[in-house]
């Protein structure tokens, strides 16, 4: 029973060995020839590209190139790439990996040298050649080069010694052509036996050559090793050759050289009727065919001249449609960006009012609360504010104007206004006016709005301050402390007094002295009267005395100064009105003339002399404005 069981096992082993030997003895299967188009360049009426072929049969030349669009053949000229032209053509390279172990000594190494010389002579002039020896240790003898003399010299210097390190040699070859912009690259490996000394494994060699075709030549190797080399070629898209004697080694190298055919520079003449069309160029040569999608360049010289026709301009219907679209765009922008920001500002205002009486910290509003659509824009504007180190300055300005917006929200709002101003100016006066004037106009409008709001709020604070201090004096005389008196006053008076003094009280609950909190309020609101009152409080705390009487004296002084200030403004109102009229006169007259008689003032911005006069006029107006405002500004 044991003998009967052993016979099938031994018989199967014999069959497997015989099958491997038969497979190793088979000649390499010829790969299908293919062509590759690279470096495509085009201009009006011409398409130019480089054409290279792979796996052509021995003796087949790369010529007779045909190019067609559909069923229509196009005129073609082609020329071979020389060694000097190869500098501009896509780079091509091959690395020879030759087994120079001791088993190759004698006739085998001589045959290998002769076959390598024939291979070098058979390659086109633009192909770079490298050489790696696969004897332990593997050595890069020659990096890829077009110098054929250097390649012959490197081949002549080969000597057989040591053990076989084929896998190391293949990995070294892959390292030479693994990186860089290569139009075509290949490795040709010759071995006469099994790998005995490599530090790398077969799997590592396969991984290194995963994108590089490897042609293998098994020279008098065992069937098992020939099968391993054949599998390496199959995995990489190369060809496997089996050679039984030194005389046939040159034929194997000659057949492997067919992987590199001559490279052609092809020029295709494009008819005028195909100008500007998107087509597929069908390229055929040496029995192979490929297609290249391309959008042909427009041949302006071959087009029909255009005939100018005066446009009647948009009618009333189109103007109404355009106005509706602009209104819809503005409304959508408001709903998507401005509305969430205003809602967030309202929520923060209410929370601020609650914080005046609650010591618990408030949760910071997350960026996502302003709406998912505006989150990305808010994040970008926040980065801009932080990078410019302007967050503190902008926050102070917004607090002074009573705008419950964070600095980056205000910056985003100003950018949106600039964008809308550019759009409106572009629709009204043209693209140039929108690009040049949109951003300055939008920025100036937002700045004017902020300054006007801040000025009104500061003025309202200054007018209500004497009454606020009078309420504090009454509370002090009733026995209240200063903090209690300020709290009672903030509950009675309207904004901005209630908001600013409530904020000061909130700071005191966090441990800040009442004098320091009120001093910051005076700085924020630019109130010299409040600053003097704070000085009086500090002096009273240090030296003692009746704080109510001190504040009463300060209140009388404030009211007298406010009365004088109003009298001065009423007396200087005529001068201010005259200044505004004088400044608005040239601007309004110029705008009126531009709208009614544009041809009359066109030389002012088209002729060089007119441009100089316009610039000079603007400078004079700016200088006059500075002088007028200096004259009408009276300090009290």
Image (spheres, rainbow, N blue to C red):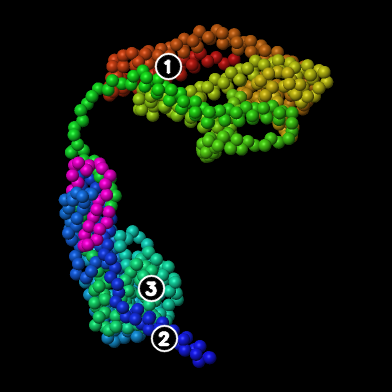
Viewer-closest of 84 and 287? 287
Q: Which structural element holds mark 2?
A: helix
Of badges 3 and 2, the one in the foreground is 2
Q: Can you tell which of label 1 and label 2 is closer to the viewer?
A: 2
Mark 1 element type: helix
Q: To which residue does mark 1 refer?
A: 624
Q: Is residue 198 magenta?
A: no
Give the extent of the magenta segment: 269-291
How far apart marks 1 and 2 lie (CA) works out to 111 Å
Q: Quadrant of residue 172?
A: bottom left
Residue sitting at x 39%, y 66%:
210
- Residue 203: image x %, image y %? 44, 72
The residue positioned 42% from the left and 19% from the top of the image is 623
In primary-sequence order, the first of circles 3 and 2 is 2
Q: Residues within 10 Å of mark 3 (few under 14, many from 20)?
A: some
Q: Are marks 3 and 2 in contact (CB under 8 Å)?
A: no
Question: Dividing the image into 4 quarters, which one contains the C terminus?
Answer: top right
Mark 2 burial class by Cα count in 10 Å: few <14, some 14-19, many 20+? few
User: Does residue 413 show up?
Assistant: yes
On whether residue 273 falls in the magenta region, the answer is: yes
Q: Residue at x 73, y 26 (%)?
A: 538
Q: Residue at x 58, y 37 (%)?
A: 368
**Mark 1 or mark 2: which comes first in sequence?**
2
| Residue at which label 2 appears | 14
Q: Is residue 553 left or right of residue 279?
A: right
Residue 236: give x, y in percent of width and height: 37, 67
User: How far, Cα to Cα, is label 3 from label 1?
Assistant: 90 Å
């Amino acid at each position: 029973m044991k003998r009967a069981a052993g016979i099938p096992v031994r018989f199967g082993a014999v069959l497997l060995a015989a099958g491997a030997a038969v497979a190793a003895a088979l000649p390499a299967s010829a790969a299908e020839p293919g062509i590759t188009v690279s470096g495509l360049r085009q201009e009006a009426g011409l398409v130019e590209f480089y054409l290279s072929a792979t796996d052509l049969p021995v003796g087949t030349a790369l010529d007779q190139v045909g190019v067609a669009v559909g069923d229509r053949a196009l005129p073609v000229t082609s020329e071979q790439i020389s060694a000097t032209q190869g500098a501009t053509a896509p780079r091509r390279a091959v690395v020879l990996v030759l087994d120079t172990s001791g088993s190759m000594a004698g006739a085998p190494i001589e045959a290998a040298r002769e076959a390598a010389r024939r291979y070098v002579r058979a390659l086109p002039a633009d192909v770079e050649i490298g050489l790696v020896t696969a004897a332990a240790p593997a050595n890069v003898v020659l990096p890829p080069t077009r110098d054929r003399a250097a390649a012959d010299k490197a081949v002549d210097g080969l000597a057989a010694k040591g053990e076989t390190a084929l896998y190391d040699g293949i990995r070294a070859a892959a390292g030479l052509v693994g990186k860089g912009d290569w139009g075509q690259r290949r490795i040709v490996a010759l071995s006469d036996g099994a790998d005995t000394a490599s530090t790398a494994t077969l799997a590592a060699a396969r991984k290194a050559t995963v994108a590089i075709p490897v042609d293998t030549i098994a020279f008098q190797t065992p069937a098992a090793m020939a099968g391993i080399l054949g599998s390496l070629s199959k995995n990489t898209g190369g060809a496997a050759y089996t050679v039984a004697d030194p005389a046939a080694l040159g034929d194997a190298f000659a057949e492997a050289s067919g992987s590199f055919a001559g490279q052609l520079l092809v020029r295709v003449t494009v008819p005028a009727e195909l100008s500007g069309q998107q087509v597929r160029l069908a390229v055929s040569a040496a029995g192979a065919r490929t297609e290249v999608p391309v959008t042909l360049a427009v041949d302006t010289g071959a087009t029909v001249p255009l005939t100018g026709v005066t446009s009647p301009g948009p009618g009333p219907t189109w103007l109404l449609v355009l106005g509706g679209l602009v209104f819809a765009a503005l409304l959508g922008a408001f709903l998507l960006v401005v509305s969430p920001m205003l809602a967030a500002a309202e929520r923060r205002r209410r929370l601020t009012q609650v914080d005046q009486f609650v010591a618990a910290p408030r949760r910071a509003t997350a960026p996502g609360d302003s709406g998912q659509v505006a989150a990305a824009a808010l994040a970008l504007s926040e980065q801009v504010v932080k990078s410019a180190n302007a967050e503190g300055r902008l926050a102070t300005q917004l607090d002074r104007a009573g705008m419950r917006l964070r600095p980056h929200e205000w910056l985003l709002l100003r950018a949106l206004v600039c964008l809308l101003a550019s759009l409106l100016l572009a629709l009204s006066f043209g693209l140039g006016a929108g690009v040049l004037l949109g951003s300055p106009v939008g920025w100036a409008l937002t700045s004017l709005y902020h300054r006007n709001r801040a000025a009104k709020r500061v003025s309202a604070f200054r007018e209500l301050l004497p009454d606020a201090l009078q309420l504090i004096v009454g509370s002090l005389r009733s026995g209240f402390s200063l903090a209690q008196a300020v709290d009672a006053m903030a509950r009675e008076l309207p904004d901005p007094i209630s908001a600013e003094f409530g904020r000061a009280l909130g700071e005191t609950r966090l441990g800040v002295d009442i004098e320091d909190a009120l001093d910051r309020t005076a700085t924020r609101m630019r109130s010299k009267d409040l600053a003097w009152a704070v000085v009086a409080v500090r002096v009273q705390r240090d030296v003692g005395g009746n704080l109510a009487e001190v504040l009463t004296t300060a209140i009388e002084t404030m009211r007298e100064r406010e009365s004088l200030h109003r009298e001065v403004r009423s007396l200087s109102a005529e001068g201010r009105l005259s200044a505004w009229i004088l400044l608005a006169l040239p601007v309004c007259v110029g705008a009126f003339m531009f709208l009614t008689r544009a041809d009359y003032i066109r030389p002012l911005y088209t002729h060089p002399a007119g441009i100089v006069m316009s610039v000079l006029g603007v400078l004079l107006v700016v200088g006059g404005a500075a002088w007028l405002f200096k004259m009408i500004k009276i300090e009290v």
